[in-house]
């Protein structure tokens, strides 16, 4: 008999959604369907007062720059049921005042009742309830625990502990933790922060790493990646949202500072308000011919850029950052953030390098160190990166996830 998995998440791609919605939860759900599980996804889509969607574009751009996330006026705001690839998805909207505000109790209760009505409608009783992000998922867990006492319930935390740690843990979110069988974390760093805050929380814990598509691994490993580290001019690559918390302009600052010793080309993939800052920085320092802003490009083309690049750099605040794994798979020398999501996967000096978040001075020193490292050492680090990344395929991490919650 197939086991039923209910996925609860505020973020999920859709057939009618805007471009750029992170598909991280979908990758897991899609793999579980392939493995023969019955999977239903409920996407808790926050909807704000209508005036929010009529603000001038400049305000959205400012919010994106300051808060570090994309604020879009054209997100879907109606309930919908659809199939995304192999996965059955139900989008159920829930009212919220503003992005950084909390949900009201009455709206959470109403939302739960709508979810339960949907489950009855499709005759779906979950054996496993897996949630992602703390808000609003942890506010729903008490309702699901009461309704489905024999189900295994888990939630994966993706970022900081702002909601859970309010009032030293005396809040609705922490109360929701008490109804879990398993608590997951998107990185080792997040788990360690949680354990420092709440050393006596004794539920089973695991780290929920993401993977790259198996076909990408097969494609990359079927070709001979010829990373030429002896080139005078190296191609440095950044892929991500161009927002403050990603620090893409700091990479250019560091490259400009090392240019006299080591020529560079800086390729930037992504969109966001900080793109204008990068353009201005390039103009002011007469390096416009050494900077390529490609905007948003298809995932396959991103992988092509990674294969061409010698070094991938992103010293941002990240919960995990799947793009790091993709860059490692492509043989790039990866410079990532210390004490962030990828720390623990990347081991400094073995399969990549670690730098303090947004620290342009340390990044400059790392670039100088890498460029002066013997070629055979660089080639070995590149090979180590590829071998590490192969262990993070979608199929492997999806099975590890199931095993962590007791469904395998």
Image: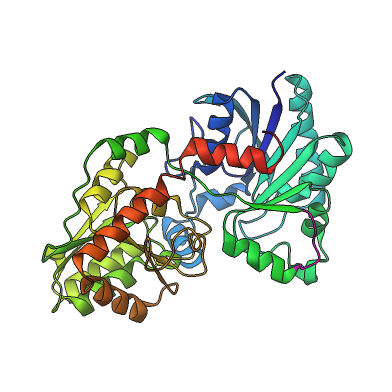
The answer to whether residue 237 is visible is no
| Along the viewing direction, whichever of 395 and 168 lies nearer the viewer | 395
Question: Does residue 104 appear left or right of residue 86 in this picture?
Answer: right
| Above or below: residue 26 compared with residue 367 | above
What residue is at 83 percent from the left and 48 percent from the top? Answer: 179
Per the rendered image, the range of residues in magenta is 198-203
The answer to whether residue 118 is visible is: yes
Q: Residue at (50%, 35%) from the top-left corner? A: 395
Query: Which of the 4 image quadrants contains residue 162?
Result: bottom right
Image coordinates of residue 385 in percent, x first then y, are: 36, 54
Q: Name which residue lies at 76% across and 42% down.
A: 153
Lateral position of residue 138 relative to residue 213, left or right: right
Residue positioned 22% across, 63% down in the render:
376
Q: Image quadrant for the N terminus?
A: top right
Provide residue 190's location: percent of width, then percent of height. 61, 62
Q: Is residue 201 magenta?
A: yes
Q: Is residue 276 above or below residue 57?
A: below
User: Residue 311: x and y, percent?
Assistant: 27, 61
381 vs 375, left or right, is right
| Residue 185 percent across, percent down from the top left | 63, 54
Q: Is residue 36 above or below residue 128?
A: above
């Amino acid at each position: 008999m197939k086991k039923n998995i209910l996925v609860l998440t505020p973020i999920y791609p859709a057939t009618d959604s805007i471009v750029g919605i992170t598909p991280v939860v979908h990758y897991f759900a899609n793999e579980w369907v392939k493995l023969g599980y019955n999977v239903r996804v409920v996407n808790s889509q926050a909807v704000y007062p209508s005036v929010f969607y009529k603000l001038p574009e400049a305000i959205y751009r400012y919010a994106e720059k300051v808060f570090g996330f994309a604020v879009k006026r054209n997100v879907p705001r109606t309930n919908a049921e659809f199939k995304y690839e192999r996965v059955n998805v139900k989008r159920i909207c829930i009212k919220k005042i503003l992005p950084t505000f909390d949900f009201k109790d009455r709206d959470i209760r109403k939302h739960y009742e709508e979810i339960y009505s949907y489950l009855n409608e499709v005759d779906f009783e979950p054996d496993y309830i897996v949630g992602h992000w703390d808000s609003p998922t942890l506010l729903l867990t008490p309702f699901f625990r009461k309704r489905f006492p024999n189900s295994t319930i888990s939630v994966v935390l993706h970022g900081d502990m702002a909601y859970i740690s309010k009032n030293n843990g005396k809040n609705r979110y922490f109360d929701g933790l008490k109804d879990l069988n398993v608590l997951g974390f998107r990185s080792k760093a997040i788990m360690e922060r949680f354990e420092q805050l709440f050393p006596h929380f004794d539920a089973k814990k695991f780290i929920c790493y993401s993977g790259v598509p198996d076909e990408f691994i097969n494609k990359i490993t079927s070709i001979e990646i010829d990373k030429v580290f002896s080139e005078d001019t190296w191609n440095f690559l950044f892929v991500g949202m161009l927002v403050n918390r990603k620090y893409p302009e700091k990479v250019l600052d560091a490259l400009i500072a090392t240019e006299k010793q080591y020529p560079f080309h800086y390729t930037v993939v992504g969109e966001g308000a900080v793109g204008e800052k990068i353009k201005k920085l390039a103009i002011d320092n007469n390096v416009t011919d050494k900077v390529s802003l490609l905007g948003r490009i298809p995932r396959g083309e991103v992988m092509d850029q990674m294969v061409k690049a010698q070094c991938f750099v992103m010293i941002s605040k990240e919960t995990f950052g799947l793009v790091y794994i993709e860059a490692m798979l492509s043989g790039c020398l990866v410079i990532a953030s210390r004490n962030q999501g990828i720390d623990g996967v990347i081991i400094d000096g073995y399969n990549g390098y670690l730098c303090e978040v947004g620290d342009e001075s340390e990044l400059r020193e790392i670039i100088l160190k890498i460029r002066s490292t013997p070629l055979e050492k660089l080639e070995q680090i590149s090979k180590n990166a590829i071998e590490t990344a192969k262990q993070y395929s979608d199929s492997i991490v999806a099975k590890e996830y199931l095993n962590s919650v007791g469904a395998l």
